[in-house]
Amino acid sequence: MAETWLRFVLLALYLCTWASGSTNIIFQKIKVGESITVSCSTAHIDLDGAYVYWSLPTNKVVVNVDARSQKMTADDGFKERVKRTGSFPKFSFTISTLAKEESGLYWCEYHKFNEETERTDKFRSEGPILMVLVEGSTNIIFQKIKVGESITVSCSTAHADLDGAYVYWSRPTNKDVVYVDAESQKVTEDDGFEGRVKKTGSFPKFSLTISTLAKEDSGLYWCEYNKFKEETRRLDKFQSEGLVLMVLVEGVEPNQHPTGETPRTLLQPSKGEQNFSGEGMTMIIVGMCAGTIILCCIVLSLMAVPKVKRLCEKGYQREYHPHGHESIYEDMRQNCSV
């Protein structure tokens, strides 16, 4: 019985960890020349710095902030357009004068060089991802659908003699959803998308329909071809001539805010924004998980009391002798009282 309760507690801990680390998306539609604000915050300490990334679909660093010097370095194309509010590690960036080519995903990520592994560890900001659509974008197609509906990703290229093609999904880390082999035409679906993908046409020009989308499937979708070069021993990649799909799956009401003006940040969506998979729901889940764990600890403690009593009684029986050891008897009675 105790082992069953222990497994339940471990499962609750796992679910709490998943819920607290789940990522939500806020959609924001703006006009050319307007601004966005990306918020950065973390519970991690002793970090080296933070990056603000922009993905469409390749990840590009917009801003880098050094933890010690607080120095902010903006990437080419964003210089003179970035303004910081606050200090490391909790701050926000306002990126102004956005062009129609700057639609995409924006998010904050912290980094720390690990001396033991000699690699850089990365930690996603506690704030959600900002999905930005600038009106008039020509390199992206925005598609807002309902839970359970489908999307279609088109793949085409002028390149020849290729090995295959991937359909990627970014939220914001790139994940290959489907792989199509050029020679066999075989379609290999990734975990979570099995049975949900249908191909129309043949390599290299085809389309893939992904069905039964959930709220968590929001993000960027695009097609990319690949070819392994024997001379360089590297994999060359070619993006499809088809446009990038920006998909927002509806299903959650926007967050409610107090009356009056609120800053346009990841945690406070303004007019024209929709909070996807709201942070409030995450807090509710975490609260429920914490309550469940506390309840389990109480139950386990109550279950342990009878066992302690039995152990004490056995100890008393071993220690007590009817010939003049009343002092030991009294000590055992006091220790076993609950």
Image (spheres, rainbow, N blue to C red):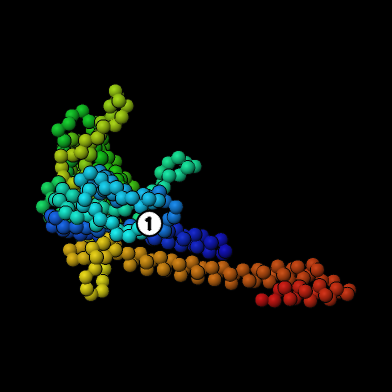
Front in this rendered view, residue 213 or 217: 217
Tell me the kind of residue under disc 1.
Answer: Pro
**Residue at position x 37%, y 56% in the image:** 88
- Quarter of the image where the N terminus is located: bottom right
Residue farthest right in this picture: 323
Quadrant in which residue 86 is drawn: bottom left
Q: Quadrant of residue 40?
A: bottom left
Q: Is residue 159 above or below residue 85?
A: above
Question: Is disc 1 placed on a helix, strand or loop?
Answer: loop
Q: Residue at x 85, y 71 (%)?
A: 321
Q: Quadrant of residue 126?
A: bottom left
| Residue 200 visible to an observer of this rendering | no
Q: Could you say where residue 183 lies in the image, as x and y percent from the top left?
A: 24, 31
Q: Which residue is at 69% across, 70% downward?
A: 310
* Image quarter in which the C terminus is found: bottom right
Of 321 and 19, nearer the camera is 19
